[in-house]
Image (cartoon, grey):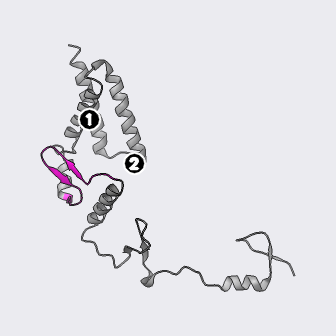
Amino acid sequence: MAQQIDPTGSAKPLNAPLQEEKAQRKPTHQAPAGGADRVSLGGSKKAEATYGPGLKVAEPYDLLRQLVVKTLLDQGAASTVDTGSGIIDLATLTPEEAQVLVADDGYFGVEQTSDRIVEFAINGFGNDPNKIQQMKDSIDKGFKEAQQAFGGALPEISQKTYEAIMEKLDTFAASFDQ
């Protein structure tokens, strides 16, 4: 009789009865009742949420919003943003409020965001038009890093914001050429 090899372990030969015993063993991990998977975040050994047919969420947006807010808080980031005209609480932000914020004239829209970035760049480089290329290179680097963090592509609003920034920096530099 030829010796049998255990493909999951070492190259040591196994006795036929031992191999049969291994095949008949029950797995040590059993799925939770109901067949749903459980996930626990934050180091707790107790399952906090069950994902499956029984999951009840008012809106899928709520689950995503809660996850984003929890992630930011876990990283030590504030869950509020001061827009100058009021404070936005990310923990209670509705989809409608988010749409207003990223609209063309919204706080996180192309115009206001590009204005803030250009103002920061100009002030950061001492209001010196001779450093326009350094400003652009720094902004390029930031956008490239963000692009990598987003898996290689940025949302359309980010691309439009980048274009607006570059136009505004060109306008700033041209104002000194006159």
Mark 1 or mark 2: name the one nearer the start of the chain. Answer: 1
Looking at the picture, which amino acid does disc 1 mark?
Ile
In-image side of 47 versus 125 (left or right): right
Specify few, some or many for label 1: CA neighbours under 10 Å numbering under 14, 14-19, or 20 or more.
some
In-image side of 128 versus 143 (left or right): left
Label 1 – label 2 distance at C-alpha: 20 Å
Foreground residue among 39 and 177: 39
Q: What stretch is highlighted in magenta?
A: 76-95
Quarter of the image where one finds residue 93: bottom left
Foreground residue among 7 and 49: 49
Specify few, some or many for label 2: CA neighbours under 10 Å numbering under 14, 14-19, or 20 or more.
few
Residue highlighted by disc 2: 150
Residue 97's x, y, as percent? 17, 55
Which quadrant: the C terminus? top left
Quarter of the image where one finds residue 130: top left
As for residue 90 lying within the magenta part, the answer is: yes
Residue 149's x, y, as percent? 41, 47
In-image side of 4 versus 97 (left or right): right
Q: Relative to 120, does residue 127 appear above or below in the rendering? A: above
Q: Which residue is drawn at 41% across and 40% down?
A: 145
As for residue 133 lying within the magenta part, the answer is: no
Residue highlighted by disc 1: 117
Toward the right, the furthest residue is 1
Q: Is the magenta stretch mostly helix, strand or loop?
A: loop
Q: Which residue is drawn at 42% across and 70% down?
A: 44
Residue 46's x, y, as percent? 41, 75
